[in-house]
Amino acid sequence: MTRPDPVSRVASRRRARWLVPAVFWTMVLAALLLVFGRPMLDTAPARGASSEAAAAAAPDHARLPSPDGSASAAAPLDGLAMPRSAPIRLRIPKIGVDAPFTGLEIGPSGALNPPPADDTNLVGWHASGISPGERGTALIAGHLDTATAPAVFARLGELDAGDRFEVKRSDGSSAAFVIDSVEKFHKDDFPDERVYDDTPDALVRLITCAGTYDRTAKDYTENLVVFAHLQPAD
């Protein structure tokens, strides 16, 4: 009969020495999990879970927009969404905007139709979409200029992150927004998904033309987009 080598014998003795304590601590750990483990599993997403699963586990109001306009985890802030209500007036004190709203529809090309070009002090919103202050992404569009004069969003590019604006609503309430970023995009490379993102937060995009005027296309080459989120009530 072949004898086990010295290393195997030492290993066998070590296994025998630790067998009873290992069984004991395993039973203790199992008992602790029965008492304390279930609430932890019920209330927290598992480590390594997908971002979709983690987002689903967190309440909607716990995710606030990051400076780039995307949703990110943050401390819960209740009341960051308002009931649906049509906007009636936009006020941006820094650039002197105080303008009424008109409803806009999506055109055959899939883009939001612009407001009427003959009114220099008028902004439009996607009337069948999200209202400003409501949970989701609300779209507000305005002209940079007309054939004869600067228009309502002529100074939109002067805004900075941290600036604020206000939307008066038909239910008598006001929605205050804080700007996250102000960015320009070439119209041939417009980030649709980012600008029109489906989000659990109350966001607004202010959109106008920018860049140089293409006389052949009779349009500007870029769009300027202001990304903003609803400000918590005081």
Image (cartoon, rainbow, N blue to C red):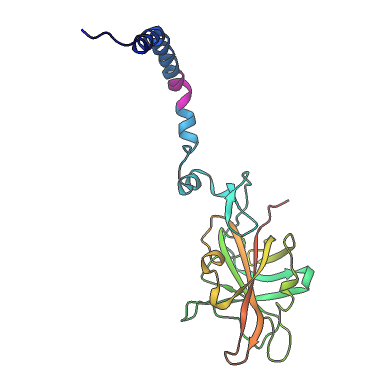
**In what quadrant of the picture does the N terminus appear?**
top left
Q: Where in the figure is residue 152, as x and y percent of width and height?
A: 71, 79
Q: Where in the figure is residue 27, as x and y percent of width and height?
A: 40, 14
User: Does residue 15 belong to the magenta stretch?
Assistant: no
Residue for point 45% across, 22% down: 33
Q: Residue furthest left?
A: 1
Residue for point 54% across, 55% down: 200
Identify which residue, 34 or 11, lies in the foreground. Answer: 11
Give the quarter of the image for residue 101: bottom right
Give the quarter of the image for residue 17: top left
Q: Is residue 25 left or right of residue 203?
A: left
Q: Is residue 194 left or right of residue 2?
A: right
Identify which residue, 85 or 231, lies in the foreground. Answer: 231
Residue for point 74% across, 65% down: 160
Is residue 232 depicted above or below 226 in this figure?
above
Is residue 112 depicted above or below 33 in this figure?
below
Q: Where in the figure is residue 138, as x and y percent of width and height?
A: 58, 66
Q: Where in the figure is residue 170, as x and y percent of width and height?
A: 63, 67
Is residue 13 depicted above or below 159 in this figure?
above
Give the quarter of the image for residue 167: bottom right
User: Does residue 33 belong to the magenta stretch?
Assistant: yes
Magenta span: predominant SS is helix
Count of labels shown?
0
Q: Is residue 65 left or right of residue 22?
A: right
Residue for point 59% across, 81% down: 114
Residues drawn in magenta: 32-37
